[in-house]
Structures are given as structure tokens and as C-alpha cells.
Amino acid sequence: MPVVNENKSIGISKSFSIEDNKSLLLKGKMKEKYKLVLSYDGTDYCGWQRQPDKKTIQGMLEEALAKIIGQKVAVIGAGRTDAGVHALAQAAHFQASTHLQEKELWRAFNAILPGDIRVIELEKVDKDFHARRLAKSKIYQYRIINSPLITPFLFRYAFHWPAPLDWQSMAEAAPLFVREADFSGFSSNRFLRPIRKVTASIINKKESEIIYTIEANGFLRYMVRTIVGTLLEIGKGKMSPLEIDKIFHTKSRSLAGPTAPAKGLCLIKVNY
């Protein structure tokens, strides 16, 4: 684990160090709530959620926070990204007692965390704020490189499909997912409350890159990747857009396309 260099990495007073910060805590100090906005490359992580003996985004954040403030504190995310999924702006919160100012906390996080996880915003919020419960919608994007070759600089962040795709058929099918409905047919898990409201489902193409964007009030597990897999089957000519309604009607996962690889998926924004 990287160690904070108090003179270079963190850029705050020389007297600050991770070990000495424990003395900054006051036993009677009231806890305050902080909101984080995070970017991360999920390639080398087993998803967001903390897991025993596995490297996760939540686990790394909590380890860093424990070193900074001398306390074990839970970091609550707006949602759980799966193993290999990335985030441009994931939201989270934690509640803790510390004399460090927001800017000092922000610098300390980024000095300790590995380079593939960055805290891009940190601020105090009202005690009633909750990163998951108060989220109104989330926006995800899935990137597909449809060309004979993929550059090494995109390999970790996009799904490469070298064969031809009828992206216009995919683009025509994408809006069919805009609805409030039971999305069980597009998830590998069964949920007690599988109703989700999708408000945007769009495909754009720029040269060899196809970008699928979806916004909803929530997502079932593997939901976006299964929708992408279904759109890819349509692009390959193996499915018709008319079959989408049948999947919603039957709720049969076997009728939908395969789950697209995780590396093409990125959480773009959480709206409050």
C-alpha cells in the first residue's frame, strides 16, 4: 500500500502524517457526513462491494480512510459496480469525526489510494444525505469498438467486436428499453422488486466506436450488460427488435442475449 509522503504527495503541513493524525481526534467531537465522487478503473478489482480476502473499491476506500482518521468507517456507495466495471463519477458517503478539513481529506485519500482510484470531489453534506437511497437516477455507458483491431489504449475500457455490426438496427432497437417494467428477463438474478424505470436508452456511433447510453432509477444485476448483449445480437442479425417485447412479457432470461463483458461498462454519473 502506498505511504503518504507528507512533503510531496499530500501537499499539506509537514506536521501531518497518517500515524500522528489519530491524536487529532477528539473523543467528544460530533461525527460529520461527507460525500465522495470517485473515478476508478475497475479492471483489477472484484467490484465495488467489500469482500473478504479480495481487492474491491469499497475495501480500498475503507482501508485508506482508517489510516487517515484512525477509525474503521463504512463507505456507502450509490450502487455496486460488478468486477471489472469502471466508474467516471461514482458517488459514496461516510460519517466520521476528524479535525481535517475537506481539502486535507481529499489530498490524503489520493495520496494513499492506488492510481487507478481517484477521489475527484469531497464535501461535507447534510446528515440526512444517503448516497444510495437518495439517488434519483444513474447513467451508464457501454463502449464497443467495431473494427478489425483495437488499440491497446482502449483494450481495458471497451469491448472489441471485429465482425460487421448493423449498428443502425441496434440504434432503432435501443429506445424499446425506455419503459417502467419488470426487467427480470435482462438479469441473471431474481429480485423481490424487479421493476425499474428506464428514461433514456440511446446508441451513437463515431467512426469505429459504438456508445450505448442508458439512464434509469436503478439497475438489476447484469441488467445493462444483458441489454447490450441483446443489442449486439440484433446488430449481428441473430435477433429481431420485435423479440424485446417478448422478453419483457415472458421475463425469460434465456431469450435475451449473452451478458456483454464487464470492461466495456462505465458508471458515468449519479443524479440526486
Image (cartoon, rainbow, N blue to C red):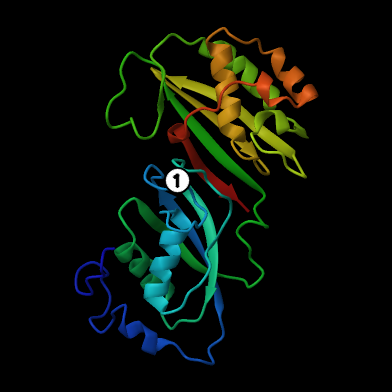
Q: Give the residue furthest to the left.
A: 7
Estimate the x, y position of residue 77 in percent, counting from the top left.
55, 57
> In the image, is residue 134 above or below residue 250?
below
In the image, residue 30 sits, relative to residue 149, either above or below, namely below
In depth, the one of 51 and 90 nearer the eye is 51
Give the left or right position of residue 206, taking residue 9 as reference: right
* Number of marks in picture: 1
In which image quadrant can residue 228 be found? Answer: top right
Q: Residue at x 74, y 30 (%)?
A: 179
**Secondary structure under the numbered disc 1 in the rendered image:** strand
Q: Quadrant of residue 33?
A: bottom right
Residue 135 horizontal/vertical position (percent): 64, 53
Kindly give the residue lying farthest to the right in the view shown: 249
The amino acid sitting under disc 1 is: Leu
Query: Picture quarter containing residue 162?
Result: top left
Q: Is residue 253 above or below residue 118?
A: above
Instruction: Name the residue at 45% across, 28% down.
Output: 143
What residue is at 49 percent from the left and 56 percent from the top?
Answer: 51
Give neighbour class at mark 1: few <14, some 14-19, many 20+ (Cα, 10 Å). Answer: some
x, y percent for residue 208: 39, 17
- Residue 251 horizontal side relative to residue 112, left or right: right
> In this orientation, which residue lies closer to the viewer: 102 or 133?
133
Quadrant placement of the N terminus:
bottom left
Instruction: State the residue in front, 246 or 78.
Output: 246
Residue highlighted by disc 1: 88
- Residue 34 point in image, percent of width and height: 52, 69
